[in-house]
Amino acid sequence: MLSSIYHDNQPVTIGILGGGQLAKMSAQAAYRLGLRVAVIEPAENSPAGMMTKADFPLGWYDSTELERFVEVSDIITLENEFIAPEILDGMTDKRLVFPTPDTLRQVQDKFIQKQTMQRAGIPVPVFAAINSVEEAYTFGKEHGYPYVMKTRTLGYDGYGNATVGRDNQAMVAFMRFTSDPDVPRQMMAEKFVKFRKELAVMVARNRRGETAVYPCVETVQENHICRYVLAPAPDIDDGIRKKAQEIAVAAVEAVEGVGVFGVEMFLTDTDKLLYNEIAPRPHNSGHYTIEGCYTSQFENHIRAICNLPLGSPDLIVPAAVMANVLGKRIGSGVPDTVVGLMRHGRVSFHLYGKATSRVGRKMGHLTALGASVQEALALVKAAEEDLLW
Amino acid sequence: MLSSIYHDNQPVTIGILGGGQLAKMSAQAAYRLGLRVAVIEPAENSPAGMMTKADFPLGWYDSTELERFVEVSDIITLENEFIAPEILDGMTDKRLVFPTPDTLRQVQDKFIQKQTMQRAGIPVPVFAAINSVEEAYTFGKEHGYPYVMKTRTLGYDGYGNATVGRDNQAMVAFMRFTSDPDVPRQMMAEKFVKFRKELAVMVARNRRGETAVYPCVETVQENHICRYVLAPAPDIDDGIRKKAQEIAVAAVEAVEGVGVFGVEMFLTDTDKLLYNEIAPRPHNSGHYTIEGCYTSQFENHIRAICNLPLGSPDLIVPAAVMANVLGKRIGSGVPDTVVGLMRHGRVSFHLYGKATSRVGRKMGHLTALGASVQEALALVKAAEEDLLW
């Protein structure tokens, strides 16, 4: 349904918690479908906030601001899984919220998340909660080294992780995240996975439980940040592709997810798939879908939360490659010059419109299509050399 | 250049005169490039106006409103060629405006437009200014019947045209548009063209004079309104395709156009190309470029007026077909149900977000890609049957 049930003679307003690039691209999809957009984020001039008058820059910790945001919205979603589920709880008696607070609870704590997946029969790395330095030593003794010590909540892009290479590193790793008595952190450990590829699958699931499953892609990281996404993942068997998609669907169903979800997996050096992470929202590994697929992850996210039929997730062309455009310095969010980049006429350039850049910050992305992953990758690599900050 | 030269630490703001679907899709492209958008239009809640806080709904006849719009904008463009060039003149000492007032002057008066094209060596139908009923009779006597009587300014989608089938219809046709002394209309006549196809080519031209030429497409009209666009135009020789593209480029150069222009042509039943019309802005016949081409007409319009290199206008897939979604009744701008339509998972649905519909009003469009025009056309036709107002 596209008509608002709360406001006469209006289309649905999608309310987005968060105003960054994921919110921006979701807003783009909502507008294409003739819907309206509201954005709440604790900042002025956010990339998505610029695109609407229904912008609430005091953020969701301001209860009046939050009330006003809820009032203008019909269906509420998020771009950032770190929001406290209690804030969503407070909205669900007034408006539909997807993903739901319950889904968020199962996802936000990485230990609970892994338990949920394991219970659903999804293959996961060996893991355990670590509540003391002694348990840290025990984990290493039982399962070997190296292992990864992780904060159970609030980690992303490598923040909140520490590799424990041998027993005498366990204490330092544990203390690193737990030494501030004002900021209690629960910890967990995961056996280090020797992987030959990191894979990802986006899954859209609407309120009726219908799903659209995107291709299995490979993500290439540098310094814990995604650099490239290769679609479809090259050099893996069709059987593994299908299995990765099945795992992704099972993961989304395990948390009763509604919306688009990004499921990340490891492909071990013995070609076994192991679940890694789930993001309850559109994901960096799905930006290629804008040009590369019949329906982008952003449009399917909007369709899913509006309970509309999902669009085809299939690739339009044989291959697509996305490259993140990461900040190289502290400075302006506008590149010095894009003229060189734009001469690459078959490469799509997305600039998120953030006011400032810093090293490693996601400022935009490039996407190229091709007859093969190699061809598309060569196109983006040639283009990114000509983008000067 | 993407940085504003008028406002520190900001990207360029594209100011758009007009807030309808062409402005909306241009705004989408500007946002993707990290730019900002301002919209001026004499209406609240216009499709494009919804997408920005820099919305000026008192319109350009309000001089204060116009000043405020000009102040926030860096580069100004339009979505509607009916704006008085004098309004643009008033802005050009402060801001860059594309298309320029001079281009608009050459385009807005269809008689001057045809003279310009003829002088540039472009093949045009036989035409003449008609300043009296006598001249109307003379035209028919010299060139035969039927011919089309047209207002020289302000006609579109068939409004302002009257077919003169025989001499005794000439007076009625002439008087029809010229009988109101308060609304002086200048008239012209054009010999009726027996065409087997109507063709169109979008051309982007930046401030350096670089061009990107889109495929030659066929437009299918019903009741003077575009119903379908078939890309590329089927059943014509490659030689004719190339010639159509050359004519289109020559037409844009003849008016020194900057931005994206839609050039329409007739293909006669003896396979001759005749120039018909030019729109100094993105055009209905180019909506297929959003999904179908490496760079949409809207993005190339933004690139052109910002003097950036143009993106590739090539088709990504063999064929694309667009169908306009036209209003069937007076009523809401939101369809009763889109569920049936959206089950067609490979058809892209664009809804413009207009508040009300009326018969024949452009409310949105559908686009399908395919291995052939027939395949893509079948997809859109199947989908549009399931869209219910």
Image: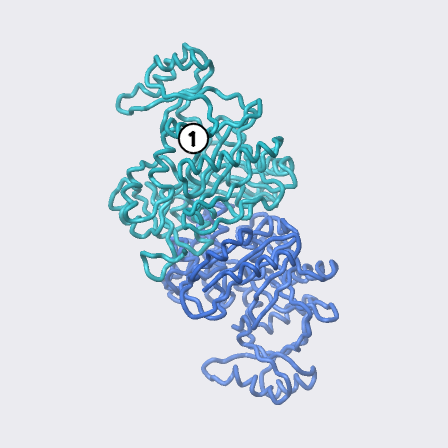
Chain colours: A cyan, B blue
Estimate how packed mark 1 is, as few (under 14), some (14 to 19) or many (20 or more) residues with alpha carbons within 10 Å.
many
The subunit letter for the residue under badge 1 reads: A
Which residue type carries mark 1?
Met
Against B331, residue A3 (above or below) is above
Q: Would residue A299 appear left or right of A183 to someone viewing this image? A: right
Q: Does the image show residue A378?
A: yes
Against A108, residue B217 (above or below) is below
Q: Would residue A35 appear left or right of A242 to someone viewing this image? A: left
Q: Residue furthest bottom?
A: B168
Q: Would residue A183 appear left or right of A283 to someone viewing this image? A: left
Given residues B102 and A69, the one toward you in this image is: A69
Q: Which residue is mark 1?
A: A117
The x, y position of residue A228, in whole percent, is 54, 33
Given residues B150 and B266, the one toward you in this image is: B266
The x, y position of residue B352, in whole percent, is 46, 59
Residue drawn where x is 51% and y is 60% of the image: B386
Tally the numbered discs.
1
Given residues A261 and A383, the one toward you in this image is: A261
Against A250, residue A314 (above or below) is below
Q: Does the image show residue A389?
A: no
Given residues A19 and A168, the one toward you in this image is: A168
Q: Residue furthest top?
A: A168
Which structural element holds mark 1? helix
Q: Would residue A170 appear left or right of A292 to someone viewing this image? A: left
Q: Quadrant of the C terminus of chain B?
A: bottom left
Against B204, residue A86 (above or below) is above
The x, y position of residue A172, in whole percent, is 37, 14
Residue drawn where x is 33% and y is 16% of the image: A132
The x, y position of residue A102, in whole percent, is 34, 38
Residue drawn where x is 42% and y is 63% of the image: B333
